[in-house]
Image (cartoon, grey):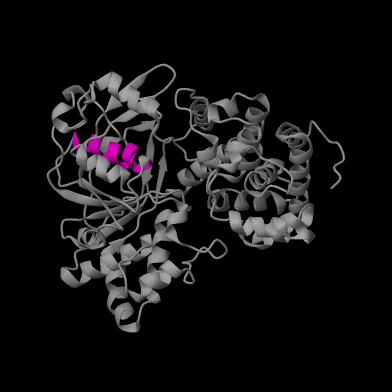
């Protein structure tokens, strides 16, 4: 039986919902990571910018391996909906700024050709922190990873993001050598500088002839600006498909939900031009780091604590978790006491207004961001958020109780003690370090108490510095014990100083 609604396509899109009257005819941007965040953030900012200026700035979207979104977008003539939702309103728009969608594992040569195309001026990335294949301990390229080794040999199409970029740039240099910008839009400290370093490390590991050929060209023709991106974008569910259908009268299989808030800050260091993103709401600055740290710590760091405490408390969504008074109080404490003192707030940001916005965003019940989604990949995320602020306080002789609570809640979620069940939402969190943590947990000598936390810190999970502070490991261990014995509310009370009962392992 045919579906009662027509499929979303350009011809079936109501004119009022289109950001652009017509999609761009030419591709100027190749984007790696065709997920929800890109489609609700960079694509939206680009479409909005192109309402005010012309240019060949269509986006070719590249999914790494999953074909679901790419195929749906091709079936829908590159159209999809962005469902901006809040408790008071729902707004549905169609950016229609993509010129194509492909899957890297299915079309590897097409990807390399696109990266090398003379018209490609900007390569953007949202592949998550995990997608850069760097070593958690050193922060450098993981040269021991089998996928990296295969990409260096060049005996198969490149599989890693860094391998794809370098091989694409290598093809570019050999065909026409036009300059290009590589713009990371992931939550990494100094994401542009880190991407440049990883590209350089990959290049230096190539055979001498390739290395010596590519290195000087990269130095002169490729730029890697730093950027900061900020928008809460949950996973797609039938709720958002229904919202798109209700508002536009069409059937979209891959709508993107998003909060109304969106922010993008970049260094204006582009080698071959760029869209006028400032007309789409982006901010350009000579120093992205203060904005980046503000977001990584106040938003992302606090968000992680809410997710882990919420999951342990049986809360499915971030709004459900934030509605719990003990979680909201813990969030305010980690934000004000542990994170904010470590920051230099940009002059154009009112911290009180920014923090108020954060709590309004986390309380957006219409959005329903899941704790399992926010809590996933914590072994990569927390390394960007916790160590430096924690060391800032520890070196000054202060215990950052709520950063210790963040680590304790994370470990209870993804490396629970034998016999302790963290609940279904924590169990559903994906984490590349689960196997490593399970090995540490399973060792009889480190199954509980400070030795377990010390072993985790010694593993390099949170860098190297925290392993020099056994008092921090002991505090994390105390809070783990409270979570296991009495629940997350008791641990949060102890971190706040309202509960100071002796804890015995």
User: In the shown orientation, is residue 243 left or right of residue 60?
Assistant: right
Magenta segment: does it hold 38? Answer: yes
Residue shown at 56%/48% (left/top)? 378
Residue 278 makes an appearance in the image? yes
Please name whichever residue, 341 or 56, is drawn nearer the observer in this view of the structure. Answer: 56
Magenta-colored segment: predominant secondary structure: helix
Q: Is residue 153 above or below residue 410?
A: below
Residue 61 part of the magenta-drawn span: no
Q: Position of residue 332 (x, y in %)?
A: 63, 31
- Depth check, front residue: 69 or 477: 69
Q: Please indicate, yes or no, whether residue 97 appears anywhere in the rendered image.
A: no
- Residue pictured at 66% horizontal, 29% vertical: 329
**Rendered-image quadrant of the N terminus:** top left
Whole-percent x, y for residue 212 in the image: 31, 80
Residue 193 relative to residue 473: left or right: left
Q: Above or below — where is 173 with respect to 358?
A: below
Residue 289 picture location, percent across and down? 46, 49
The magenta stretch is: 37-51
The residue that appears at 20% across and 39% down in the rendered structure is 75
Seen as rendered, the residue at the extreme top is: 88
Residue 292 percent coordinates (x, y): 47, 46
* Above or below, 213 relative to 294: below
Please state the total of marks drawn on the protein image.
0
Q: Quadrant of residue 488?
A: top right
Q: Residue furthest front?
A: 1
215 sits left or right of 450 in the view: left
């Amino acid at each position: 039986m045919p579906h009662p609604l027509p499929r979303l396509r350009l011809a079936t899109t109501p004119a009022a919902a289109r950001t652009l009257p017509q999609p761009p005819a030419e591709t100027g941007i190749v984007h790696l990571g065709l997920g929800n965040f890109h489609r609700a953030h960079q694509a939206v900012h680009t479409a909005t910018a192109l309402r005010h200026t012309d240019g060949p700035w269509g986006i070719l979207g590249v999914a790494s391996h999953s074909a679901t979104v790419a195929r749906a977008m091709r079936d829908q003539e590159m159209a999809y909906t962005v469902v901006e939702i809040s408790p008071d309103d729902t707004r549905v728009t169609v950016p229609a700024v993509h010129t194509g969608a492909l899957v890297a594992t299915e079309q590897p040569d097409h990807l390399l050709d696109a990266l090398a195309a003379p018209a490609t001026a900007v390569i953007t990335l949202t592949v998550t922190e995990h997608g850069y294949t760097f070593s958690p301990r050193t922060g450098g390229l993981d040269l021991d990873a089998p996928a990296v080794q295969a990409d260096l040999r060049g005996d198969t199409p490149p599989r890693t993001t860094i391998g794809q970029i370098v091989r694409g740039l290598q093809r570019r240099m050999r065909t026409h050598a036009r300059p290009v910008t590589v713009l990371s839009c992931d939550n990494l400290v100094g994401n542009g500088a880190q991407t440049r370093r990883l590209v350089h490390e990959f290049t230096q590991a190539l055979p001498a002839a390739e290395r010596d050929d590519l290195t000087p060209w990269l130095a002169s023709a490729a730029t890697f600006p730093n950027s900061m991106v900020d928008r809460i974008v949950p996973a797609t569910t039938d709720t958002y498909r229904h919202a798109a259908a209700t508002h536009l009268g069409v059937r979209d299989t891959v709508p993107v939900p998003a909060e109304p808030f969106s922010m993008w800050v970049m260094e204006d260091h582009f080698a071959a031009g760029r869209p006028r993103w400032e007309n789409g709401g982006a901010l350009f600055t000579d120093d992205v780091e203060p904005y980046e740290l503000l977001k990584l710590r106040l938003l992302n760091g606090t968000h992680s604590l809410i997710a882990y405490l919420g999951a342990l408390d049986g809360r499915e969504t971030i709004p459900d978790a934030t509605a719990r008074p003990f979680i909201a109080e813990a969030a305010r404490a980690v934000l004000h006491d542990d994170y904010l003192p470590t920051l230099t707030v940009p002059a154009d940001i009112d911290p009180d207004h920014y923090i108020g916005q954060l709590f309004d965003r986390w309380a957006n019940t219409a959005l329903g961001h899941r704790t399992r989604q926010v809590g996933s990949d914590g072994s990569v995320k927390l390394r960007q958020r916790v160590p430096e602020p924690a060391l800032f306080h520890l070196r000054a002789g202060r215990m950052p109780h709520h950063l210790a609570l963040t680590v304790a809640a994370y470990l209870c979620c993804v490396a629970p003690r034998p016999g302790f069940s963290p609940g279904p939402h924590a169990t559903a969190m994906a984490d590349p370090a689960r196997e490593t943590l399970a090995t540490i947990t399973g060792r009889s000598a480190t199954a509980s108490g400070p030795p377990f936390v010390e072993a985790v810190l010694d593993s390099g999970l949170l860098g190297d510095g925290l392993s020099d502070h056994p008092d921090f490991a002991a505090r994390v261990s105390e809070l783990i014990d409270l979570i296991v014995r009495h629940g997350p509310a008791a641990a949060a009370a102890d971190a706040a100083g309202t509960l100071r009962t002796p804890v015995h392992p």
